[in-house]
Amino acid sequence: MSHKLIPVAGQWYLHLDKGQPFCVVDVDKNEDHIGLQHFNGDIEELGFADWFDMDLGIAAEPEDAWGPLDEVESTGAGFGNTALTPEDWRTSLEEAPSPEDMWDEAPQDQP
């Protein structure tokens, strides 16, 4: 069943035949491209002809709209403050400590 809904970036829609919500994340008329992100996190791209062939309705944004995309805690393993400062760019490679020197300076666990 076709519809007359115009795709709008940021708007949530519902596949009426599937009952699945999705959000339009990108619309480019010149490239005949509509980018969708489904509630489960899947990304889909389609053209305007496919868009107008789908059975769609407007949907309210889900309460936990981006729930499938778990938040990553910056204090977790492997994550930290890796931002570079202007001083980092001013230090030449010759002045920077070697990995071996950094290893030697690392605190050692003592039993």
Image (spheres, rainbow, N blue to C red):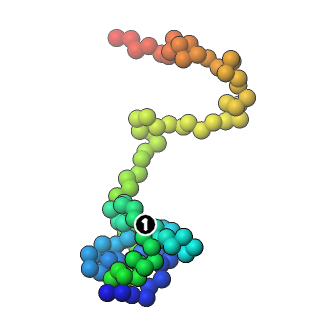
Residue placed most toward the observer, 100 or 108: 100
Image location of residue 38, percent across then percent down: 36, 66
The answer to whether residue 36 is left or right of residue 20 is right
Q: Of helix, strand and loop, which one carries label 1?
A: strand
Q: Residue at x 36, y 60 (%)?
A: 41
**Residue type, numbered disc 1:** Glu
Image location of residue 9, percent across then percent down: 51, 73
Residue placed most toward the observer, 46 or 98: 46
Q: Is residue 60 visible?
A: no
The answer to whether residue 81 is left or right of residue 77 is right
Residue 108 sits in which quadrant?
top left
Residue 75 sits in which quadrant?
top left
Q: Residue at x 46, y 77 (%)?
A: 48
Residue 110 sits in which quadrant?
top left
Image location of residue 39, percent across then percent down: 35, 65
Instruction: From this view, report whether residue 79 is shown above or below residue 41.
Output: above
Query: Residue extending furthest right?
Result: 90
Q: Is residue 52 visible?
A: yes
Residue at image mark 1: 45
Q: Would you call the spot at circle 1 few (<14 residues within 10 Å), some (14-19), or many (20 or more)?
A: some
Image location of residue 50, percent across then percent down: 39, 77
**Image quadrant where one finds the C terminus:** top left
Instruction: From this view, report whether residue 29 is shown above or below residue 41.
Output: below
Q: Residue at x 67, y 36 (%)?
A: 85
